[in-house]
Amino acid sequence: MSDELKRGLEGVLVAESDLSYVDGEVGKLVYRGYDIEDLARGASYEEVLYLLWRGSLPTREELDAFTADLAAERAVDDDALDAVRTLADAGERPMAALRTAVSMLSAYEPESDADPEDLDATLRQGRRITAKIPTLLAAFERARQGEDPVAPDPDLSHAANFLYMLTGTEPDDVSAETFDMALTLHADHGLNASTFTAIVIGSTMADVYSGVTGGIGALSGPLHGGANQDVMEVLQEVDASDKDPVQWVKDAREEGRRIPGFGHRVYKVKDPRAKILEEKLRDLSESSGDTKWLDYTTAIEEYLTEQGLLDKGIAPNVDFYSGSVYDSLGIPVDMYTPIFAMSRAGGWIAHMVEYQEDNRLIRPRARYTGPKASEFVPVDER
Ligand SMILES: CC(=O)SCCNC(=O)CCNC(=O)[C@H](O)C(C)(C)COP(=O)(O)OP(=O)(O)OC[C@H]1O[C@@H](n2cnc3c(N)ncnc32)[C@H](O)[C@@H]1OP(=O)(O)O
Ligand SMILES: O=C([O-])CC(=O)C(=O)O
């Protein structure tokens, strides 16, 4: 037993996985060997889910059947929709509302008695969760706006249907494709904090609802998925102030603040997903003629590069550009992290099942630094 302490489990190997590989030195990400750029540009989110859950890219026929099965699971029980409305009325934050709502979904799971070792049943449960998360999120956002939920349309893709349920209007092709690409980019990323949370939960042979609920909790933090909202809030703060973005960053650095959307535990160069989203933002900004967020993010990145941050391995991560892209789709800022969860649920489920195929309870240890022999004194004598 080694006594070497690895804070934050940095670099510690805890599992084998065929799902995704992150090369942080060169900025490369693959899902089952396929480069993220090829998948983002050429595959739908449904294809990526199939790849992650079934092990290979689907044929057209397989994809059609898979897409139909997923779409057939989108409807959410009325009681769960009522609960979502209650959470919205109570002013709950969207990630917390999603965490509660996903946990509640298990009450309506038709295979809730399945043997935990029946991983086909786990995958079917995971499919139900993945299909229903967009329905929950859209209903939550509409409830906040005082609107009724929009029923899912089984003829629309996972991405297009979410935008449709959010706004009540079928999205145009550019919006649907952009959103689909964002879902693909966020679907999996090795043993990031939320995926690790999900597999720790899965390693007790707990059910997939528990794993996804835990994953949502872990993703919500500002050091992880919550950073996409923080980035947009910074951009909005800059916009509302009399500062330019560079001045804002200078002040923030002087105050010792971290810049959201920069830095990564694995990437020491720019995140390949950030590159793809930046390009997307450039296209969208140029075609709309509104380049404000692009100008701000570019100015911040250029300034931090001049300041040598990139040389120190602190580079833009996926969260730096995603928010600006979502803004162009008219999505409210505090829904950005829930959208990340909508996509990453696919990765959490894939990792839980893969881990459970050769399960070993995850149970590390802490170096004990407390006293070893304190004398107990009864409460009334202390
Ligand atoms: C989807 C995702 O989860 S991507 C990550 C999203 N999170 C963010 O964007 C939040 C901002 N970034 C961060 O807080 C960090 O970069 C993390 C948490 C993502 C990774 O951090 P770690 O691997 O733990 O690196 P650590 O915290 O040790 O930082 C190393 C050094 O870089 C600095 N640094 C890291 N990120 C930043 C940043 N965003 N801005 C300024 N400095 C930073 C730290 O201050 C530290 O400097 P020091 O050695 O002089 O003290
Ligand atoms: O890998 C990580 O640590 C964080 C991340 O980028 C992700 O989860 O997508």
Image (tube, rainbow, N blue to C red):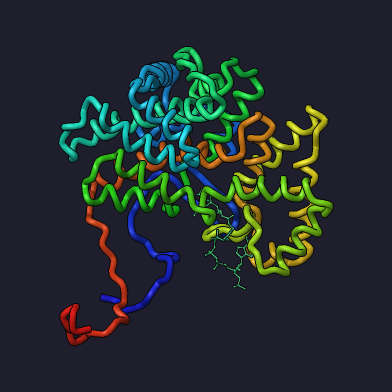
Query: In this view of the protein, can residue 318 be seen by the observer?
Result: no
Single out the residue that lies furthest toward the front: 380
Residue at horizontal 65 percent and vertical 18 percent from the top: 172
Place of residue 26 in the rendered image (x, y in percent of width and height, measured from the top left): 60, 56
Total marks placed: 0
* Side of 379 where 341 appears, left or right: right
* Side of 16 where 91 appears, left or right: right
Image quadrant where residue 216 sits? top left
Place of residue 115 in the rendered image (x, y in percent of width and height, measured from the top left): 15, 36
- In which quadrant will I find the N terminus? bottom left
Residue 357 or 290: which is nearer the viewer? 290
Q: Is residue 191 above or below residue 89?
A: below
Q: Is residue 169 above or below residue 127?
A: above
Query: In this view of the protein, can residue 354 be seen by the observer?
Result: yes
Query: Which corner quadrant of the figure contains ligand 1?
Result: bottom right
Image quadrant where residue 282 sits? top right
Residue 325 or 100: which is nearer the viewer? 100
Residue at horizontal 31 percent and vertical 34 percent from the top: 104
Place of residue 72 in the rendered image (x, y in percent of width and height, measured from the top left): 37, 17
Q: Is residue 378 above or below residue 25?
A: below
- In which quadrant will I find the C terminus? bottom left
* Side of 245 where 137 appears, left or right: left
Place of residue 70 in the rendered image (x, y in percent of width and height, measured from the top left): 38, 22
Residue 240 or 205: which is nearer the viewer? 240
Residue at horizontal 77 percent and vertical 46 percent from the top: 240
